[in-house]
Amino acid sequence: MVSKPPPDATRRSEKSRRAIYAAALSLVGEVGYPRTTVEGIAARAGVGKQTIYRWWPSKADVLLEAFLDLSRQAAQEAGQEPYAIPDTGDLAADLKAVLRLTVDQLLDPRFEAPSRALAAEGLVNEPLGREFVTKLLEPQLQLYVDRLRAAQEAGEVRAGVDCRIALELFVSPLAQRWLQHTGPISYDYTDTLVEYALHGIASQPPRSA
């Protein structure tokens, strides 16, 4: 009699990990961050509570890792894995492309509800807010900084421009409009943000002092 091979622990662990990601994101979107618990995530994922604690120290770590994984999936689906801002030599086109991908993510039901819940909680829960910024937001913003610096070296961006401040001209308005529902977000909107950020809104260049 031929014995069956032992179960593949790696495959089993990955299946559990995926179930935990999905459970964490769906729960925080449904009930909010404060009411999301490790016990609730475990129950929905069909795993033991200790399975979660073996891999993550807290529910915040579970959710942040689930978000990073969701972002990677979205980039892969868009043909941009690993996630990066393209450098085709045309800064405006590259920024418009990546902001259109961002619009797709922000409007994706898988992303929107849990993202809003975490963003709101981060405003009143300072440790979570810092972790959210450090682990999720800053690495994404650094991609913009790197792309703007490359454009600066190529002469597309004026020397002396602070690239970390410059990126906020198009990233921050999008985030504010999405978070506060001050208007619809669309490709036309983000394309316009890029145009205004790169070319300004003055009718003519300012006079030299």
Image (tube, grey):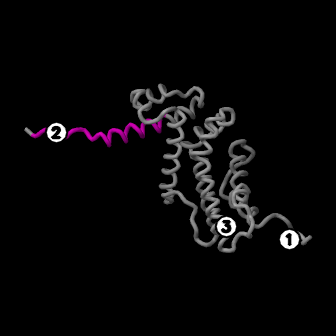
Task: Choose between 168 and 180: the one closer to the eye.
Answer: 168
The magenta segment is 2-23
Helix, strand or loop at label 2? It is: loop
Residue matched to label 1 = 205
Helix, strand or loop at label 1? It is: loop
Does residue 20 appear to the left or right of 131 in the view shown?
Answer: left
- Furthest toward the left, the residue is 1
Quarter containing the N terminus: top left
> Image point 62% across, 44% down: which residue?
133
Percent of width and height locating residue 63: 53, 38
Q: Is residue 110 above or below residue 190?
A: above
Q: Which of the two discs, 1 and 3, labels the residue nearer the N terminus? A: 3
Percent of width and height locating residue 2: 10, 40
Quarter containing the C terminus: bottom right
Task: Choose between 2 and 158: the one closer to the eye.
Answer: 158
Verify whether residue 18 appears in magenta: yes
Residue matched to label 2 = 4
Mark 3 residue crowding within 10 angstroms, few (<14) / some (14–19) / many (20+): some
Q: Which of the two discs, 2 and 1, labels the residue nearer the N terminus? A: 2
> Image point 66% across, 71% down: which residue?
153
Asked whether the beta carbons under mark 2 and mark 1 sit within 8 Å of each other, the answer is no
